[in-house]
Amino acid sequence: MQIKELLLQSPSQQTVTVKGWVRTKRVSSSVAFIAMNDGSTIHNIQAVVSDGVVSEETLKLVTTGSCIAVTGILIPSQGQGQSVEVQVTAIQVYGTADPEKYPLQPKKHSLEFLREIAHLRPRTNTFSAILRIRHALAFAIHQYFNNHGFFYLHTPIITGSDAEGAGEMFRVTTLPAINPPLTEDGKIDYKEDFFGKETNLTVSGQLEGELGAMALSKIYTFGPTFRAENSNTTRHLAEFWMVEPEMAFFELTDNMNLAEDFTKSLISYALENCADDIAFLEKRLLEEEKMKKKEEQSEMTLSEKLRFVSENTFERLTYTEAIDILLQSKPHKQGKFNYPVAWGIDLQSEHERYLVEKHFKKPVILTHYPKDIKAFYMKLEDDGKTVRAMDVLFPGIGEIIGGSQREDDYEKLLQRTKDVGIEEDSIWWYLQTRQFGSAPHAGFGLGFERLVLFVTGMSNIRDVIPFPRTPKSAEF
């Protein structure tokens, strides 16, 4: 039985066996108190070993980090913080951990240090809580879409197209790094490669997702995506997970309605099903906040921030209206923004957070961005300047969702591909869907790690994925 279940049992002198890793051991008056955890819950269970019950040789092997199984009687706990404990009758040591070498001793470790030992950090309270919340959110995503008539579509990891048109992609090749085959004009001959053409790791499953929506009406993808951006920031990863629904017969307003309901549902699920882990992370965050200057401290606790999003109607306005607000803002007039504000710019996180946290004090959905700063597939408005795009902005995060109504007019889409330099031959299949039964459709992408970042209250995206992939770092 897992510790999570055991802690809910009513003690009636039943014999139980508990397996897990030792968090701490202390000895008082010849009685050993062992705190154990198996990862099923943030809470430990205490195993009490009376003098003489277990050999001294065995007890010496029980140190922080060792893996053991204890058998004993489940009794009411005499200590605080738990209702039951185990009165030990036997201990089996599965694996020892030399206290002179084991890096996770019972003390506070910095997040930077823990990133260096990502193979062990899930054993800490902080990271076990994050990973349980990550699981719960992933489950809630599948549950939400299943309950709303969506089909889960598996889109390819290896692709010959660039959904964003950004060119920052990881190349996939079997050609030799030294002396690859060349064409007559001296370029690499990808016809000799495994797939017979140049291929990359996907930056998005969206384009293929649209193909599915044109047959199944409502689909979603949920998988890893890759960006070869040299971005050493707290908000970027080279490998991350994206949730991307695509819906036939949806227009921009339908898309916004779905994005709002979807995110509220996920956060409500976490509040309901991850209460203990959120409470632990909230306490941790409060301790962290005390170290900051007063003006830098958050006005809300973690759970308050989550309820703030799940219970508030999202504010909706156009990009143009947002620019006007920013131009009239005190930070702009006083020169406190690090980046300039003008119509046509790609909004920075500081601009997005001002709108959410200072001006509206609620989540925001921005629409109708300039076409020149958005992807080629977004539906062009009649003004010829803006597209039916939408971004969902959250407090502390900025953009958490990006989406749009997709261009369903063949001629307009073809012209946009030419404008941004995408070769028609590379996405002939995508263009063809606009020739055979085209329909209004829309979709969006939710960065899964940014969602986990928001729900856990962590400040660095490298701490919400088990093994972060970043520039110059691909350990584990």
Image (spheres, rainbow, N blue to C red):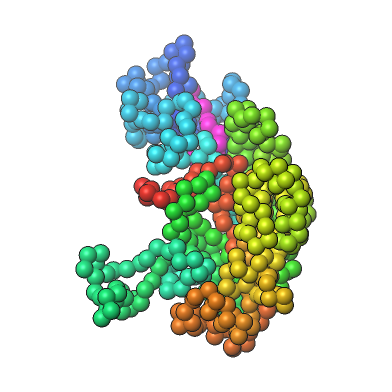
x and y percentages locating residue 91 in the rendered image: 39, 29
Comparing 247 with 123, the one in front is 247
Comparing 282 with 290, the one in front is 290
| Residue at the image position 43 percent from the left and 50 percent from the top | 470
User: Where is residue 439, by image quadrant?
Assistant: bottom right
x and y percentages locating residue 421 in the rendered image: 49, 75
Q: Which residue, as the protein is rendered here, is positioned at the far top? A: 29
Query: From the viewer's perspective, is 383 left or right of 209?
Result: right
Count of numbered badges drawn on the protein: 0
Query: From the viewer's perspective, is 16 left or right of 362?
Result: left
Comparing 211 with 112, the one in front is 112
One can see residue 31 in this view: yes
Comparing 390 with 380, the one in front is 380
| Residue at the image position 48 percent from the left and 36 percent from the top | 111
One can see residue 390 in this view: no
Q: Is residue 40 magenta?
A: yes
User: Where is residue 400, by image quadrant?
Assistant: bottom right
x and y percentages locating residue 430 in the rendered image: 53, 80
Q: Which residue, as the protein is rendered here, is positioned at the far left? A: 179
Query: From the viewer's perspective, is 333 left or right of 340?
Result: right
**Does 97 appear above or below 315?**
above
Magenta range is 38-49
**Does 89 appear above or below 151?**
above
x and y percentages locating residue 9 in the rendered image: 60, 36
Q: Is residue 23 magenta?
A: no
| Residue at the image position 64 percent from the left and 29 percent from the top | 293
| Residue at the image position 55 percent from the left and 36 percent from the top | 42
